[in-house]
Image (cartoon, rainbow, N blue to C red):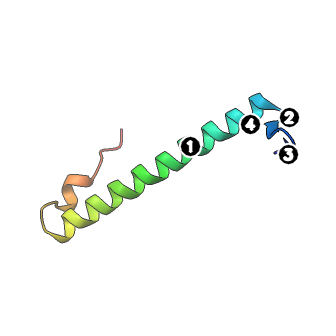
Amino acid sequence: MLVDNNNLKTVDNKLTIETIIWQVVENAIDKIVGALSSLIIGLMQDGLLKEEVIKIPVQ
């Protein structure tokens, strides 16, 4: 990523903004997946969620 240190302005604004947006989106997806995984594992350990509930039918 090219940055002009004097003005702290990006040389290629569009590319940089797009990159930042994708990083934010990927980070959010990772956090959501992690939270759902923790929730499912916790519910299964507490016996509140059985394995059959999670299975998704494949069409």
**At 23% across and 66% down in the image, what residue appears?**
42
Type of the residue with mark 3: Asn
Type of the residue with mark 4: Thr
- Residue 8 placement: quadrant: top right
Which residue bears the numbered disc 3? 5
Work out whether 36 lies above or below 42. Answer: above
Q: CA distance from mark 3 to mark 4?
A: 15 Å
Q: CA distance from mark 4 to mark 1?
A: 12 Å
Mark 2 crowd level (few <14, some 14–19, many ≥20, 10 Å Cα):
few
Q: Nearer the viewer, residue 53 or 25?
A: 25
Q: CA distance from mark 3 to mark 1?
A: 23 Å
Mark 3 crowd level (few <14, some 14–19, many ≥20, 10 Å Cα):
few
Q: Where is residue 26 drawn, in percent x and y?
A: 55, 46
Q: CA distance from mark 1 to mark 2?
A: 20 Å
Q: CA distance from mark 4 to mark 2?
A: 9 Å
Element type where label 4 sits in the image: helix
Q: Where is residue 30 drawn, in percent x and y?
A: 48, 52
Type of the residue with mark 1: Val
Which residue bears the numbered disc 2? 11
Which residue bears the numbered disc 4? 16
Which of pointers 1 and 2 indicates the residue nearer the eye? 2
Q: Where is residue 21 drawn, in percent x and y?
A: 61, 37
* Most distant residue in the top direction: 14
